[in-house]
Image (cartoon, rainbow, N blue to C red):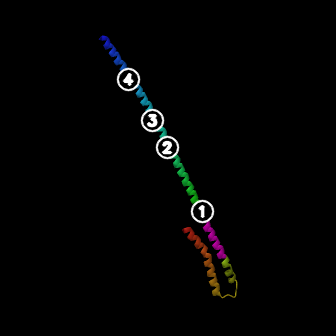
Amino acid sequence: MELEEVAHRLDNENRKRQMELEYEARKRDIDLRTEESKRNYELQRRKADIEHQHKIAELIAQMKQTKLQAGKELVFTYMKTINMIIDQNSNIFRSSEPLLNQLKDERLPEQIKNTIQNAINKAFMLPYVLCLNFILS
C-alpha cells in the first residue's frame, strides 16, 4: 500500500507540474497575444491619425484653391467693370466733342452755350458717378 501511495503522490505531483506548465504556457500565450493586440492597436491609431492629418491637409489645400479661384474671379469681374466704365467714358467724350466744337461758334447765343456747357459737365460727371457706385457696391 505504501508503494501505491508513493505512486499516487508522484502521479499527483506530475499532474500538478503538468497543470502548472500548461498554466504557464497559456499565460505566456495570452501575454503574447495581449502585446500583439497592443501593438496592432497602436499601429491602427497612428494610421488613423496620419489619415486624419492627410484629410486636413487636403481640405486646407482645397480651401486655398477655392479662395484663389474666388480672388481671380473677383479681379476678373472688377477688370471687366473698369473696362466697361472706360468704354463708356470714351463714348461720352466722343459724343461730347461735337458739343465742344459748337461752343467755339461765336454766333451761338449765350443761353445755348450755357446749356451745352451744362450738358458736357453732366456727361463728364457720369463716369465719376459710375465709378463711385461701383466702388461703394
Residue that appears at 62% across and 70% down: 84
Image-quadrant location for residue 14: top left
Image-quadrant location for residue 4: top left
Residue 20 is labelled as 4
Q: Nearer the viewer, mark 1 or mark 3?
A: 3
Q: Nearer the viewer, residue 19 or 3?
A: 3
Q: Which residues are magenta?
A: 74-93
Q: Amino acid at mark 3?
A: Ser
The residue that mark 1 highlights is: 75
The residue that mark 2 highlights is: 49
Q: Secondary structure at mark 2?
A: helix
Residue 55 is labelled as none
Q: Amino acid at mark 4?
A: Glu
| Structural distance between the alpha carbons of marks 2 and 3 | 18 Å
Left or right: 54 in relation to 2:
right
Q: Secondary structure at mark 4?
A: helix
**In the displayed structure, would residue 60 be above or below residue 12?**
below
| Structural distance between the alpha carbons of marks 3 and 4 | 25 Å
Q: Nearer the viewer, mark 2 or mark 1?
A: 2
> Considering only order in the chain, which callout, 1 or 2, is on the residue closer to the N terminus?
2
Counting from the top left corner in percent of width and height, residue 116 is at: 64, 83
Q: Amino acid at mark 2?
A: Asp
**In the displayed structure, would residue 97 be above or below residue 83?**
below
State yes or no: residue 23 in magenta. Answer: no
